[in-house]
Amino acid sequence: MSREYPDRPWVGIGAVAFRGGAVLLVRRARPPRQGLWSLPGGAQHLGETAEAAARRELLEETGVELGPLVLADVVDAVTQDEAGRVRFHYTIVDYAGEWRAGEARAADDAQEVSWAPLDALDAYALTSETRRVIALARERLDARRRGAPA
């Protein structure tokens, strides 16, 4: 099945990687959202768990590895063409974790990577949905650290 004009949604997996007061962002090298900053991620492979896909995609795109993960959110990303037909539809499962290893570098589907300071995200023109997921991911990681239910 083609990712463009699909007959069903694709399962996308995202990783919200934190290091100190920064979050790892990638500039997309391919459609959809080519040239825009977003969270690292991609399509889940058949037979692959969602968490394994998050770790693989993050490593392939950025060279970064995370410690324990928490589920951050599930988001539907739907792009329609001028006629209103669904051109792309991804149901994205976003996981979050703290940096464990690796030096961030652009690879695979990433044109560029950046450890973006959380207090300077305006410089990256992120979608409101991406900002919301980053904030929610931070809350859930903080809750886990405190031992509270995420």
Image (cartoon, rainbow, N blue to C red):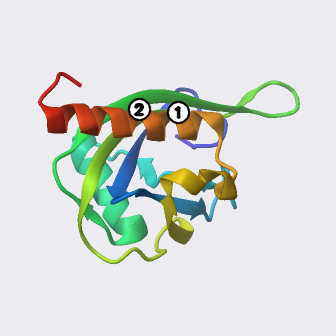
User: Could you tell me if residue 48 is visible in this image?
Assistant: no
Residue 146 rendering spot, x and y as whole percentages: 16, 33
Which residue is at 68% across, 58% downward? 123
Q: Is residue 85 left or right of residue 47?
A: right
Q: Tell me what residue is drawn at x 42 percent, y 66 percent.
A: 61
* SS at badge 2: helix
Q: Which residue is mark 2?
A: 136
Vertical order, 5 against 62 (above or below): above
Residue 28 visible in image: yes
Is residue 106 depicted above or below 150 in this figure? below
The label on residue 132 is 1
Looking at the image, is 113 positioned above or below residue 1? below
Which is more toward the observer, 148 or 49? 148
Residue 12: x %, y % from top left: 44, 40
Amino acid type at circle 2 is Leu
Label number found at residue 114: none
Does residue 58 lie above or below 62 as drawn?
Answer: above
The reply to whether the C-beta atoms of the residues labelled 1 and 2 are less than 8 Å apart is yes
Dot 2 alpha-carbon crowd within 10 angstroms: few under 14, some 14 to 19, many 20 or more: some
